[in-house]
Image (cartoon, rainbow, N blue to C red):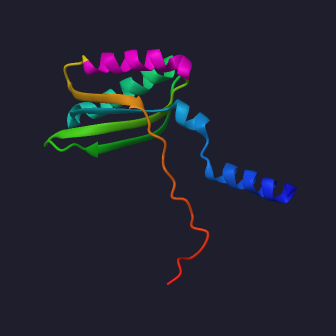
Amino acid sequence: MRHNKLAWLFNYLARTPSKRQDETSCHLNVTCDIPVITALRKQLFWEMHTLGLAATHVTITPASAAGQACLSVRLDCPVALRRAFNEMALRLSKMPEIHRVRWGRRKPETRATPRRWAASA
Protein backbone atom coordinates (compact mmCIF):
# COMPACT_ATOMS: atom_id res chain seq x y z
CA MET A 1 0.00 0.00 0.00
CA ARG A 2 2.82 2.38 0.85
CA HIS A 3 4.48 1.70 -2.49
CA ASN A 4 1.30 2.69 -4.32
CA LYS A 5 1.02 5.96 -2.40
CA LEU A 6 4.69 6.72 -2.87
CA ALA A 7 4.48 5.94 -6.58
CA TRP A 8 1.42 8.20 -6.87
CA LEU A 9 3.28 11.04 -5.11
CA PHE A 10 6.32 10.75 -7.40
CA ASN A 11 4.06 10.62 -10.44
CA TYR A 12 2.17 13.73 -9.26
CA LEU A 13 5.38 15.67 -8.60
CA ALA A 14 6.79 14.71 -11.99
CA ARG A 15 3.69 15.91 -13.84
CA THR A 16 3.00 19.09 -11.88
CA PRO A 17 5.16 22.02 -13.07
CA SER A 18 6.75 24.31 -10.52
CA LYS A 19 4.35 27.12 -9.62
CA ARG A 20 7.10 29.30 -8.19
CA GLN A 21 8.65 29.87 -11.61
CA ASP A 22 5.29 30.80 -13.11
CA GLU A 23 4.62 33.32 -10.34
CA THR A 24 7.77 35.28 -11.10
CA SER A 25 7.91 35.01 -14.89
CA CYS A 26 6.82 38.13 -16.81
CA HIS A 27 7.03 39.32 -20.39
CA LEU A 28 7.57 42.69 -22.07
CA ASN A 29 7.03 43.30 -25.80
CA VAL A 30 8.04 46.65 -27.30
CA THR A 31 7.40 47.62 -30.94
CA CYS A 32 9.40 50.50 -32.40
CA ASP A 33 11.28 51.58 -35.55
CA ILE A 34 14.31 49.50 -36.52
CA PRO A 35 16.92 52.31 -36.16
CA VAL A 36 15.83 52.90 -32.55
CA ILE A 37 15.85 49.28 -31.38
CA THR A 38 19.53 49.07 -30.34
CA ALA A 39 19.46 52.22 -28.22
CA LEU A 40 16.14 51.14 -26.72
CA ARG A 41 17.53 47.71 -25.84
CA LYS A 42 20.51 49.24 -24.05
CA GLN A 43 18.33 51.72 -22.16
CA LEU A 44 15.88 48.99 -21.18
CA PHE A 45 18.60 46.71 -19.80
CA TRP A 46 20.21 49.50 -17.79
CA GLU A 47 16.84 50.35 -16.28
CA MET A 48 16.09 46.69 -15.56
CA HIS A 49 19.50 46.33 -13.91
CA THR A 50 18.89 49.32 -11.63
CA LEU A 51 15.48 47.89 -10.65
CA GLY A 52 16.97 44.48 -9.87
CA LEU A 53 15.18 42.62 -12.68
CA ALA A 54 16.91 39.90 -14.69
CA ALA A 55 16.10 38.98 -18.28
CA THR A 56 15.93 35.25 -18.99
CA HIS A 57 15.25 35.40 -22.74
CA VAL A 58 15.50 38.22 -25.30
CA THR A 59 14.49 38.22 -28.97
CA ILE A 60 14.30 40.92 -31.63
CA THR A 61 12.03 40.11 -34.56
CA PRO A 62 10.61 42.11 -37.45
CA ALA A 63 7.14 43.48 -36.73
CA SER A 64 4.20 43.20 -39.09
CA ALA A 65 4.58 46.82 -40.26
CA ALA A 66 7.48 47.68 -42.57
CA GLY A 67 10.44 49.32 -40.89
CA GLN A 68 9.47 48.20 -37.39
CA ALA A 69 10.91 45.63 -35.00
CA CYS A 70 9.62 43.95 -31.85
CA LEU A 71 11.81 43.51 -28.78
CA SER A 72 10.52 40.65 -26.63
CA VAL A 73 11.92 40.16 -23.15
CA ARG A 74 11.09 37.32 -20.76
CA LEU A 75 12.22 38.13 -17.24
CA ASP A 76 12.12 37.07 -13.63
CA CYS A 77 10.07 39.59 -11.70
CA PRO A 78 9.48 38.79 -8.02
CA VAL A 79 6.18 39.91 -6.55
CA ALA A 80 7.95 42.68 -4.61
CA LEU A 81 9.22 44.23 -7.88
CA ARG A 82 5.97 44.02 -9.88
CA ARG A 83 5.05 47.63 -9.20
CA ALA A 84 8.45 48.85 -10.41
CA PHE A 85 8.10 46.64 -13.51
CA ASN A 86 4.66 48.12 -14.27
CA GLU A 87 5.94 51.67 -13.82
CA MET A 88 8.87 50.95 -16.16
CA ALA A 89 6.49 49.60 -18.82
CA LEU A 90 4.25 52.68 -18.48
CA ARG A 91 7.27 54.98 -18.89
CA LEU A 92 8.25 53.08 -22.03
CA SER A 93 4.75 53.41 -23.48
CA LYS A 94 4.92 57.22 -23.14
CA MET A 95 8.10 57.51 -25.21
CA PRO A 96 7.37 58.99 -28.68
CA GLU A 97 9.63 56.59 -30.62
CA ILE A 98 7.80 53.52 -29.29
CA HIS A 99 4.66 52.42 -31.11
CA ARG A 100 3.35 49.69 -28.81
CA VAL A 101 4.15 48.18 -25.42
CA ARG A 102 2.62 45.00 -24.00
CA TRP A 103 3.55 43.51 -20.65
CA GLY A 104 2.28 41.19 -17.96
CA ARG A 105 2.73 37.83 -16.32
CA ARG A 106 3.58 34.93 -18.56
CA LYS A 107 1.08 32.15 -18.90
CA PRO A 108 2.35 28.84 -17.58
CA GLU A 109 3.78 26.70 -20.34
CA THR A 110 1.66 23.62 -20.83
CA ARG A 111 3.45 20.35 -21.21
CA ALA A 112 1.91 17.49 -23.05
CA THR A 113 1.37 14.66 -20.60
CA PRO A 114 2.92 11.42 -21.83
CA ARG A 115 0.54 8.61 -22.56
CA ARG A 116 1.07 5.55 -20.42
CA TRP A 117 -0.47 2.98 -22.68
CA ALA A 118 -0.59 2.75 -26.43
CA ALA A 119 -4.03 3.04 -27.93
CA SER A 120 -5.39 -0.33 -28.88
CA ALA A 121 -6.38 -0.73 -32.50
- Rendering quarter of residue 113: bottom right
Q: Which residues are magenta?
A: 79-93
Is residue 106 placed above or below 79 in the rendered structure? below
Q: Quadrant of the N terminus?
A: bottom right
Q: Position of residue 49 (x, y in %)?
A: 50, 23
Is 30 displayed left or right of 115 in the figure? left
Q: Give me the residue at 60% from left, 46% from top.
A: 17
- Rendering quarter of residue 8: bottom right
Is 18 displayed left or right of 58 in the figure? right
* Residue 65 magenta-highlighted: no
Majority secondary structure in the magenta region: helix
Given the current orientation, which residue lies at the most extreme right position?
2
Q: Position of residue 98 (x, y in %)?
A: 22, 26
Q: Give me the residue at 28% from left, 28% from top.
A: 101
Q: Position of residue 2 (x, y in %)?
A: 86, 55
Given the current orientation, which residue lies at the most extreme bottom position?
121
Is 117 displayed left or right of 41 in the figure? right
Which of the two residues, 62 or 120, is positioned nearer the viewer here? 120
Q: Give me the residue at 56% from left, 76% from top.
A: 118
Which of the two residues, 66 or 5, is positioned nearer the viewer here? 5
Q: Position of residue 54 (x, y in %)?
A: 52, 30
Is residue 41 placed above or below 49 in the rendered structure? below
Which of the two residues, 95 or 85, is positioned nearer the viewer here? 85
Given the current orientation, which residue lies at the most extreme left position?
66
- Rendering quarter of residue 38: top left
Q: Give me the residue at 38% from left, 15% from top.
A: 87
